[in-house]
């Protein structure tokens, strides 16, 4: 978005509601941040949330098949033992509706709703240096003034709808999976086109194919996917989980990705081909992201990675009966897990159905939409419904959209014109008392999100407590500390194969014109946690604290 059309000075007319802290977003991070600041520190806090309910990502992503790829017993808050004991998941991977029930339960249990204003989208936030307060305006013209502004806007919340010529002329209905209608979409008897084969498209395709007359999947980049083997949780597992919460938390906090399984301490190339095959087979049968943990070098050694990549390609060729379709699905151009690997329920099997067609839009790109459907360079595909599973303007998108201006009217969009620059993914130089939960430069999307969120919220809460106890008015990073952190984020990414997926959203490469910068911190959650703790132990090293 352009800054030039927006004023850089705060509007002054409307009287503001005065707060200690204002939080934007009521997903996992906003809810926990509210609880921490309001009930632990006793601050006056307001949450503003664009949706009409809690849930964040899960409020918007209601597409068919929407399900988390973290196992349910790890996809929950661990800050309260009572909450852990009273909540019971029904399946190995929680579906969207069950996650919504969980977050609504959290909101009710901790009486959070009274501090959340729903249906309220922030249109601008300006830092007033003289008053040392953030002045936040909403689309409906409300104004809030807060000492601390905390963004809890999620990393994957700004839908990326491709700019396809003629889309407005399409006579059918089209939807983006991240803005799915609450009433659902009836595919019965319809010719459906699905654009995108990331985690979302791979989840949606099998479900849409069950009722659609025909499903045409437009694939630009082939993708790895492992079977989820989702299933109801047994009573035995539910009992185990409740009896071992401390142990499970321990594993989650020691694993680089914050999951409830450990990465095996062995190297792929140290095993014989037969041993490797057996280990991959066992991991495939078990299912889920744990496949990635079969060997510790899969994300750092291309040769090791090739063994996993080839195993999955062979699986695709063995599952998909039509050799031409199998060839297009297994022609994958990046290392395994260099893009976030999806996990699926019968995705590749879906191509064995008579009512499903795969279209290779790398070979024959989409030219435009027509009133009747989609036109590629090869032919027309008549459609009734078009579904875009085309991802998000990830990590920076929701922050850039908020029209944030720091000291001297500096626009965040200006400060980040060449890519995000933060210190620890927590704060931005020139934007005092602004905290970005799971912001770019933090492990965020490379970690099981609730683990990353709890660490950030606890750090921010402790920081604000420290400021208040010591009469400190402001905190913001030193520019050189932010520069050094950006270098560390780049170093951490370059030590892995992750940047080799040159078109991934981790790099911002999925959004035309977005600067190519590797955004999340890839050094692992335990190392990141230790760095954040050390910064505090050294008196908030790298930050300027002023009275
Ligand atoms: P994504 O990973 O960015 O995938 C978008 C897909 O759309 C890609 O296949 C992309 O192709 C394609 N695409 C984009 N623009 C296109 C165009 N103009 N023409 C043709 N194809 C186009 O988005 P996502 O699948 O929504 O997933 C985003 C992230 O959300 C995931 O990586 C994951 O972190 C999270 N997520 C998690 C779950 C889960 O927990 N199970 C489920 C869904 C999403 P290219 O690759 O060629 O760009």
Image (cartoon, rainbow, N blue to C red):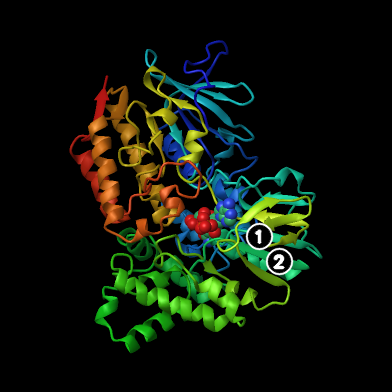
Out of 218 and 90, give the one closest to the viewer: 218
Can I make out residue 226 in this image?
Answer: yes
Q: Are marks 1 and 2 in contact (CB under 8 Å)?
A: yes
Out of 351 and 124, give the one closest to the viewer: 351
Residue in the picture at 56% in, 48% down: 57
Q: Please state if 273 lies on the left or on the right of 204 as rendered.
A: left
Residue neighbourhood size for the residue with mark 2, other residues' Cα within 10 Å, grouped as few (<14), some (14–19), many (≥20): many
Ligand 1 quarter of the rendering: bottom right
How many numbered dots are placed on residues in this image?
Answer: 2
Can I make out residue 390 in this image?
Answer: no
Q: Is mark 2 within 8 Å of ligand 1?
A: no
Residue 56's image quarter? top right
Q: Position of residue 146 (x, y in %)?
A: 45, 23
Quick one: SS at disc 1?
strand
Residue 499's image quarter? bottom left
Q: Position of residue 418 (x, y in %)?
A: 38, 36
Residue in the picture at 28% in, 36% down: 482
The residue that disc 2 covers is: 215
Return the residue found at the far right. 189
Upstream in sequence: badge 1 or badge 2 = 1
Q: Position of residue 102 (x, y in %)?
A: 57, 54
Return the residue found at the far left. 538
Residue in the picture at 40% in, 80% down: 280
Structural distance between the alpha carbons of marks 1 and 2? 7 Å
Q: Please state if 345 lies on the left or on the right of 193 as rendered.
A: left
The residue that disc 1 covers is: 194
Q: Is mark 1 within 8 Å of ligand 1?
A: no
Q: Please state if 168 lies on the left or on the right of 1 as rendered.
A: right
């Amino acid at each position: 978005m352009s800054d030039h059309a927006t004023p850089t000075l705060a509007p002054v007319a409307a009287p503001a509601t005065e707060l200690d802290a204002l939080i934007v977003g009521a997903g996992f991070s906003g809810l926990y941040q509210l609880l921490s600041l309001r009930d632990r520190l006793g601050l006056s806090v307001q949450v503003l949330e664009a949706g009409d309910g809690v849930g964040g990502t899960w409020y918007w992503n209601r597409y068919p098949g929407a399900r988390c790829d973290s196992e349910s017993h790890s996809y929950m808050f661990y800050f309260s033992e009572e909450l852990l004991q009273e909540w019971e998941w029904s399946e190995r991977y929680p579906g969207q509706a069950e996650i919504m029930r969980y977050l609504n339960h959290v909101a009710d249990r901790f009486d959070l709703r009274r501090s959340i204003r729903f249906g309220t989208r922030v249109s601008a936030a300006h830092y007033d240096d003289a008053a040392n307060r953030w002045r936040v305006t909403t689309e409906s013209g409300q104004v809030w003034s807060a000492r601390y502004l905390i963004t809890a806007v999620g990393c994957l919340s700004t839908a990326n709808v491709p700019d396809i010529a003629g889309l407005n002329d399409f006579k059918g209905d089209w939807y983006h999976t991240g803005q799915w209608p609450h009433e659902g979409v009836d595919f019965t008897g319809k010719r459906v086109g699905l654009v995108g084969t990331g985690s979302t498209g791979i989840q949606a395709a099998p479900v849409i194919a069950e009722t659609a007359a025909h499903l045409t999947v437009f694939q630009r980049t082939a993708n790895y996917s492992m079977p989820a083997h989702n299933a109801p949780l047994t009573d035995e597992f539910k009992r185990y989980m409740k009896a071992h919460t401390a142990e499970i938390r321990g594993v989650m906090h020691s694993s680089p990705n914050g999951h409830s399984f450990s990465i095996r301490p062995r190297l792929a190339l140290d095993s014989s081909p037969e041993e490797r095959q057996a280990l991959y087979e066992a991991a495939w049968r078990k299912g889920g992201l744990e496949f990635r943990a079969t060997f510790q070098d899969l994300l750092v050694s291309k040769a090791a990675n090739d063994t996993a990549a080839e195993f999955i390609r062979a699986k695709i060729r063995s599952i998909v009966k039509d050799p031409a379709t199998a060839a297009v699905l297994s022609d994958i151009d990046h290392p395994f897990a260099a893009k976030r690997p999806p996990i699926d329920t019968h995705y590749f099997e879906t191509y064995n159905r008579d009512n499903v067609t795969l279209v290779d839009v790398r070979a024959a790109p989409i030219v435009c939409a027509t009133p009747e459907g989609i036109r590629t360079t090869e032919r027309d595909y008549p459609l009734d419904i078009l579904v875009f599973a085309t991802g998000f303007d990830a990590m920076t998108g929701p922050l850039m959209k908020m029209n944030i201006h720091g000291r001297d009217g500096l626009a965040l969009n200006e400060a980040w014109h060449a890519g995000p620059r933060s210190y620890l993914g927590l704060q931005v130089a020139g934007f005092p008392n602004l905290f970005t939960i799971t912001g770019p430069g933090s492990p965020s999307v490379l970690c099981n999100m609730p683990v990353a969120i709890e660490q950030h919220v606890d750090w921010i809460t402790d920081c604000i407590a420290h400021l208040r106890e010591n009469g400190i008015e402001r905190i913001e990073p030193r520019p050189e500390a932010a520069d050094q952190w950006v270098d560390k984020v780049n170093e951490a990414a370059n030590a892995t194969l992750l940047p080799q997926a040159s078109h991934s959203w981790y790099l911002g490469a999925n959004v035309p014109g977005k600067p190519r910068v590797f955004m999340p911190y890839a050094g692992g959650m335990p190392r990141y946690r230790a760095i954040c703790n050390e910064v505090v132990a050294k008196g908030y090293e790298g930050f300027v604290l002023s009275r």
